Image (cartoon, helix red, strand yellow):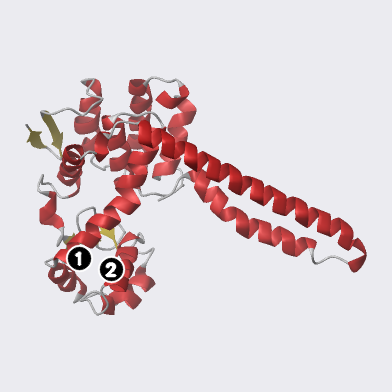
């Protein structure tokens, strides 16, 4: 959901507040020293903020100068088709707005165009944001239950009506648009942005995007930002002077390992016979026509 550096900076105010509180809890006789320490902490905080703003501006310049890549309309449509082949076994990703089932992965219900899950916070956030814009929608009554099951595989408070409510709401253009916006906000836009900053082309941007979808935008070892950090330690990204093909090769190796860590018998064809095939073919631009296999099914985009 957010870059590691930003995450650390976001946590800084909490830590700094604790430092300031601790410094202020001493005796009155040491107030001058404490004031100086507090001032130093405040200066460091401001310096960190200034550095972050400066880096953000430089990042924006890099993004502005980069080719559209996966963000171009035709390439974005292609990306949704490839992801849908793995998430919903179809190229018609728009047919999945009303999809919802428990696939037995311990993350509760998986639903919608990108596999929002009741157990991984993204579905809850989607419904909360949608309800804020559209009070009284058919999913709003389930918000208390969604908050309780968040982070678990439980259906408590959701059965038996939640799946029918989801399917009914998915017929509405407003909820379909909400799914697309949340997909872009949480998964697509951060993945493409970071891939561009790492110097990756269209294929690399898709590799990041699919990893963000499957592994989640967390910072744990086997979440997206953990995978990226591990790959950067083994092979420099193109923005650091490394080979794009070599870097992506390492990233896919690490990703496959992370998938197996989740479940040893998991199907890894979305990497092995899709993204790895594109990479081995030297198709760093993700140019069509494309042919790939997922779960034994062959897909083609002319």
**Can you say which quadrant of the picture contains the C terminus?**
top left
Q: In this view, does 24 lie above or below 66?
A: below
Q: Distance between the residues labelled 1 and 2?
A: 7 Å
The local crowd at label 2, few if under 14, some if 14 to 19, many if 20 or more residues have their Cα within 10 Å, is many
Res. 139 image quadrant: bottom left
Expressed as whole percent of the image width and height from the top left, the position of residue 30 reads: 90, 61
Which residue is drawn at the image coordinates 41% and 31% (left, top)? 198
Q: Which of 202 and 231 is in front in this view?
A: 202
Secondary structure found at label 2: helix
**Residue count near mark 1 (Cα–Cα under 10 Å), binned few <14, some 14–19, many ≥20:** many
Horizontal and vertical percent position of residue 130: 28, 68
Q: Do the residues labelled 1 and 2 touch (CB within 8 Å)?
A: yes
Residue found 38% across the figure and 36% down from its top: 63
Of mark 1 and mark 2, the one earlier in the sequence is: 2
Disc 1 marks which residue?
Answer: 175
Residue assigned mark 2: 130
Q: Could you tell me which secondary element the residue under label 1 belongs to?
A: helix
Q: Which residue is drawn at 23% across and 20% down?
A: 282
Residue 75 in the figure: left or right of residue 130: left
Please name whichever residue, 224 or 169, is drawn nearer the observer in this view of the structure.
Answer: 169
Is residue 80 positioned above or below 290 on the image? below
């Amino acid at each position: 959901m957010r870059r590691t550096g930003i995450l650390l900076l976001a946590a800084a105010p909490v830590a700094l507040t604790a430092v300031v509180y601790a410094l202020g809890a001493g005796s009155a006789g040491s107030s001058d020293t404490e004031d100086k320490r507090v001032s130093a902490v405040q200066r460091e905080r401001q310096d960190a903020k200034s550095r972050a703003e400066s880096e953000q501006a430089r990042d924006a310049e890099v993004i502005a100068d980069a080719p559209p890549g996966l963000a171009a309309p035709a390439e974005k449509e292609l990306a949704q088709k490839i992801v849908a082949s793995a998430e919903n076994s179809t190229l018609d990703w728009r047919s999945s707005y009303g999809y919802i089932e428990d696939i037995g992965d311990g993350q509760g219900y998986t639903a919608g165009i990108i596999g929002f899950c009741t157990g991984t916070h993204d579905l809850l956030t989607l419904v909360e944001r949608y309800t804020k814009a559209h009070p009284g929608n058919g999913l709003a009554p389930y918000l208390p239950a969604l908050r309780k099951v968040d982070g678990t595989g439980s259906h408590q408070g959701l059965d038996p009506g939640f799946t029918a409510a989801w399917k009914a709401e998915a017929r509405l253009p407003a909820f379909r648009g909400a799914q697309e916006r949340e997909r872009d906000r949480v998964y697509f836009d951060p993945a493409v942005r970071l891939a561009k900053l790492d110097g990756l082309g269209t294929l690399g941007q898709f590799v990041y995007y699919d990893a963000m979808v499957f592994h989640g935008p967390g910072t744990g070892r086997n979440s997206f930002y953990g995978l990226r950090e591990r790959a950067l330690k083994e092979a420099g990204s193109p923005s650091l002077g490394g080979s794009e093909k070599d870097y992506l090769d390492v990233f896919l190796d690490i990703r496959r390992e992370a998938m197996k860590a989740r479940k040893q018998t998991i199907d890894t064809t979305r990497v092995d016979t899709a993204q790895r095939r594109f990479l081995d073919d030297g198709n760093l631009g993700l140019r069509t026509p494309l042919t790939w296999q997922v779960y034994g099914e062959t897909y083609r985009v002319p």
